[in-house]
Amino acid sequence: MTWEREQEKPPLAVIVGPTAVGKSEIAVDLALRMDGEVVTADSMQVYRGLDIGTDKPTPAQRRGVPHHLVDVVDPDQRFNVAEYRKLAHEAIAGIHRRGRLPILAGGTGLYVKAVLDEFLFPDEGADYELRARLEREARLLGPGALHRRLQEIDPATAARLHPNDIRRVIRAIEVYETTGRPLSEHLATARAAEPRYRVAMVGLTRPREVLYRRIEERVDRQIQNGLVDEVKRLMERYGPLPVARQALGYKEIAAYLKGECSLERAIEILKRDTRRFAKRQFTWFRRDERIRWFDLEAFPSHEAAVQAIEAHLRAELRLAPAAGS
């Protein structure tokens, strides 16, 4: 590709958007048209065995396009955003070495940010014993005690965190204890860092009523495809999993399997929570001014949408136009 000859930063296409909007299919279409490979930015698709509930693309849906950062760890293994960032950079470097275009695609905003922005996440070098001790202190002494400690070691971070935001207060203290530098200094260093990629970001959207209908149809399809059996197998093999408490589809169906609610109620809650999750994803991504948004319902066909997105990515990344255009 041309960036090697021109000594430019290597290119990276990024596809983001809410769950069920159609990111996976668009990413594969673009990879086939632009000689690319997909790097998945989904915090649940990294886990082996969480297939139906995460809507993990099947081999047939991948259509021969390599997908990286899928099925990386077992559900009982710890995996954090710092580990994801390391593996993602390695995957992207490998794609560049092969002269192909990496396409980072997914709805986990923190994972996307980890790749694009040189930011030290508190999970990097996480000290779980220290974290547990601080959580105990918060329960015994109240959140105000931890916030006062943070004010002493990192007043800038303390000023922007509410004392009741215990999770972030603890992580900020943990960063200082494990690195010797306050989180505010790490952030300042990160903001001054030079980006490592030439990035073009695309956000996919649909009208709310269309997206919500797609969410409900996807949940129904997941149930038909065996989501209940998948969750049952995971519970039998691994027992109660920390990851299952985070993953949409797993915690709701697990509640049904434990007799806490009916299947109908579990499905109703899953649809509701997935709609809420999509709204939070929109809120996260809308803050990023680098994203060019495409309403997929505004095009006369799926092919027309793909062509428009491809043309935008080629222009932004300064790649050659598509053949025949």
Image: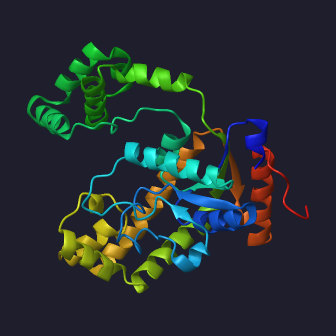
Residue at left offset 23%, top offset 71%: 255
Frontmost residue, 39 versus 155: 39
Frontmost residue, 181 versus 303: 181
Is 40 situated left or right of 233 in this image? right
The location of residue 106, given as percent across then percent down, is 53, 57
Q: How many marks?
A: 0
Looking at the rendered image, the quarter that the C terminus falls into is bottom right
The location of residue 83, given as percent across then percent down, is 38, 46
Frontmost residue, 106 versus 75: 75
The location of residue 12, given as percent across then percent down, is 65, 47
The image quadrant that residue 46 belongs to is bottom left
Q: Determine whether 197 is above or below 245 in the image.
A: above
The image quadrant that residue 167 belongs to is top left
Q: Determine whether 52 is above or below 163 in the image.
A: below
Please identify the residue farthest to the bottom as the structure is shown: 224
The answer to whether any part of residue 219 appears in the image is yes
**How are the residues colored?**
rainbow
Please identify the residue farthest to the right as the structure is shown: 324
Residue at left offset 32%, top offset 28%: 162
The answer to whether any part of residue 299 appears in the image is no
The location of residue 125, given as percent across then percent down, is 30, 36
Please identify the residue farthest to the left as the structure is shown: 140
Q: Determine whether 32 is above or below 156 in the image.
A: below
The image quadrant that residue 17 belongs to is bottom right
Residue at left offset 43%, top offset 68%: 54
Is 268 situated left or right of 174 in this image? right
